[in-house]
Structure formats: C-alpha cells, structure tokens
Image: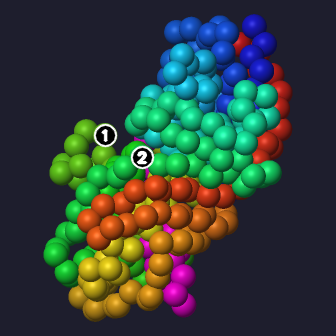
C-alpha cells in the first residue's frame, strides 16, 4: 500500500499528518515500529510526531497523536495547530473548527497561515516554594516543569532535562522540562520533550505553561530565584510572547485572580511538502 502523507511545521515543530477518515490504517500501522520508522530522520520522512485525522460524530474531526518513538501521547499544542491547518487545506473546515483530542475538545481559528488554538483549562500552578520560585509545574494538556535559569544558550537541555524528567516524583512517564530565561523584558524558552527524549525547536504546551505560570507569579508579586539570587518579573499583561528557538509563539488568555480561561496559542503553521511512502 502507498500511504499518502503531509508534512507540516509550526515554529520548527514538524509532524507527519495522515488523512484517515476512511479508517484504512489498522494495527499493522498503529504500532511503535511503523511510526518510529517513518519519523526517523535521515532514514525516512522524519518528524517530531505522527498525527492521524479521523472523522468524529460530534466534532469536525478527531486528532490522534503519537510521539516520534511511536507511543500514543498526550496533547501537542503545535501539533494541534498543524492539524487545524491540514483540515483547512483538505477542505474539512474553512475558518473555524472544533475537534477532539486526547485531553478533550479544542477550538481553532484560521487566518491565512496564522492558526489560533484554544487550549483546555490547565491544572493549578504548583510552585516549589510559595514566593521563592526556582521552578513550577502545570499541566496544559501535557505536564510541564518550568525552570528559571541564566544563559539559556549554555544549558545542556538534553542531559539536564532528562535528569529532571526522570525524577521519581514525576512518575513512570516523567515530565516535559522547560528552561526559561527572562532578558530585556523578553521570555526565552528551550524544551526537553519527555517521550521523544530530545530538545524540540518549539513546544506549544510548554510555551503556554511558561506564560501562565509566569503571569500568575507577576500578579501575586512573586520573585524568581536563580542560585539563590532574587529577580523581579517585568510588567506584563495577558498577551504574552514566548521566544522559542525557531520563532515566536503568542499566548492570549483571561485571568480572574484565581483561574485561567479562554487560553489561545497562536502562531504560523505551514505545509512543508507531501508525498507517499510504501508500506
């Protein structure tokens, strides 16, 4: 069988997308070996993840997401933006949609190449100390730890991220680890992806996690600490830009002093190429 695929990227986070509305893919293909093989760079198509689009009775479509090792995974924000662009390109939707994913329903808005993705209600932000914060954790569809650091370009994201992710307190599946530097009133991020065991060029759910946690710290007048040195947060509003290694992601949201709502992840999503692979 020749399997048609589409390759999309969102701020450098790239995915293989399959239109499986006819449900021709079965357990022969939904297995770790097949997906890991097609996602392996240099030897095959290569991607950070594998996404299947299927019909759904109650929503415009369903998103089924696998990481690059072939394991069914939790929600992926940039992957969500890519599948919205894909659904537009193959004629399922026009400018708006609502789809179902691992973590629940999501809405999407298409404005040319800019894709806005509505995120689920996050978990409560957990700070390592009440007002002396070196890191915090939050689930934004996938679980994230956000750690403050200096000189983000000098961090060995793979080794440091893996070490933190595999701590017993984060369970069998670990946690995604984001390293944050605040410089000249801008927020920079680098992310270790737990399932893929790699640094990604961009992480949507991680950028949302960073934006929400840092904004709540600002509102609560918490300082952040690096090597026991205290730093205050710059003035910020509910429209935050996060600088990833491959571009800027915008996060908009509402905050009532207790909870976050109406959270949107915004950025470009583009078709890179399409083709077919013999299965």
Point out the stretch of residues depicted in magenta. 180-195
Which residue corresponds to the image point at 82% horizontal and 32% vertical from the top-left? 274
Which badge, 2 or 1, comes first in the chain's sequence? 2
Spatial separation of the CA atoms under disc 2 and disc 1: 21 Å
Give the residue at mark 2: 120
Tell me if 217 is positioned left or right of 88 in this view: left
Mark 2: secondary structure? loop
Tag nearer the camera, 2 or 1? 2
Whether residue 27 is in magenta: the answer is no
Q: Is 24 rendered above or below residue 234?
A: above
Residue 201 appears at what percent x and percent y?
Answer: 60, 58
Mark 1: secondary structure? loop
- Local packing at callout 2 (Cα closer than 10 Å; few below 14, some 14-19, many 20+) is some
Tell me which colouring the rendered structure shows: rainbow
Which residue corresponds to the image point at 23% horizontal and 53% vertical from the top-left? 167
Q: Is 5 rendered above or below residue 197?
A: above
Residue 230 appears at what percent x and percent y?
Answer: 28, 91
Which disc, if any, is residue 173?
1
Judge by depth and name the residue closer to the eye, 105 or 175. 105
Q: Is 131 rendered above or below residue 168?
A: below
Which disc, if any, is residue 126?
none
Q: Magenta stretch mostly in which secondary structure?
A: strand
Tell me if 24 is positioned left or right of 26 in this view: right
Q: Residue furthest front?
A: 256
Q: Quadrant of residue 209?
A: bottom left
Which quadrant does the C terminus fall into?
A: top right
Tell me if 117 is positioned left or right of 130 in this view: right
């Amino acid at each position: 069988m020749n399997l048609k695929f589409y390759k999309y990227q969102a701020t450098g986070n790239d995915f293989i997308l399959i239109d499986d509305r006819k449900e021709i893919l079965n357990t022969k293909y939904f297995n770790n070996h097949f997906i890991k093989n097609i996602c392996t760079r240099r030897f095959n198509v290569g991607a950070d993840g594998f996404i299947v689009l299927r019909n759904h009775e109650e929503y415009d479509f369903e998103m089924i997401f696998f990481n690059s090792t072939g394991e069914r995974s939790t929600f992926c924000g940039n992957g969500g933006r890519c599948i919205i662009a894909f659904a537009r390109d193959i004629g399922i939707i026009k400018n708006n949609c609502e789809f179902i994913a691992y973590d629940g329903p999501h809405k999407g808005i298409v404005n040319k190449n800019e894709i806005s993705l509505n995120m689920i209600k996050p978990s409560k932000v957990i700070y390592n100390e009440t007002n002396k914060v070196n890191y915090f954790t939050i689930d934004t569809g996938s679980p994230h730890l956000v750690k403050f650091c200096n000189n983000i370009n000098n961090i060995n994201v793979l080794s440091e991220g893996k070490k933190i992710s595999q701590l017993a307190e984060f369970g069998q599946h670990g946690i995604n680890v984001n390293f944050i530097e605040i410089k000249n009133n801008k927020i920079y991020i680098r992310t270790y992806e737990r399932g893929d065991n790699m640094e990604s060029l961009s992480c949507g759910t991680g950028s949302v996690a960073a934006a929400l946690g840092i904004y709540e710290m600002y509102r609560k007048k918490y300082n952040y600490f690096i090597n026991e040195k205290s730093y205050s947060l710059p003035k910020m509003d509910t429209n935050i830009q996060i600088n990833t290694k491959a571009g800027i992601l915008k996060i908009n949201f509402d905050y009532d002093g207790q909870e976050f709502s109406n959270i949107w992840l915004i950025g470009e999503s583009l078709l890179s190429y399409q083709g077919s692979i013999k299965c």
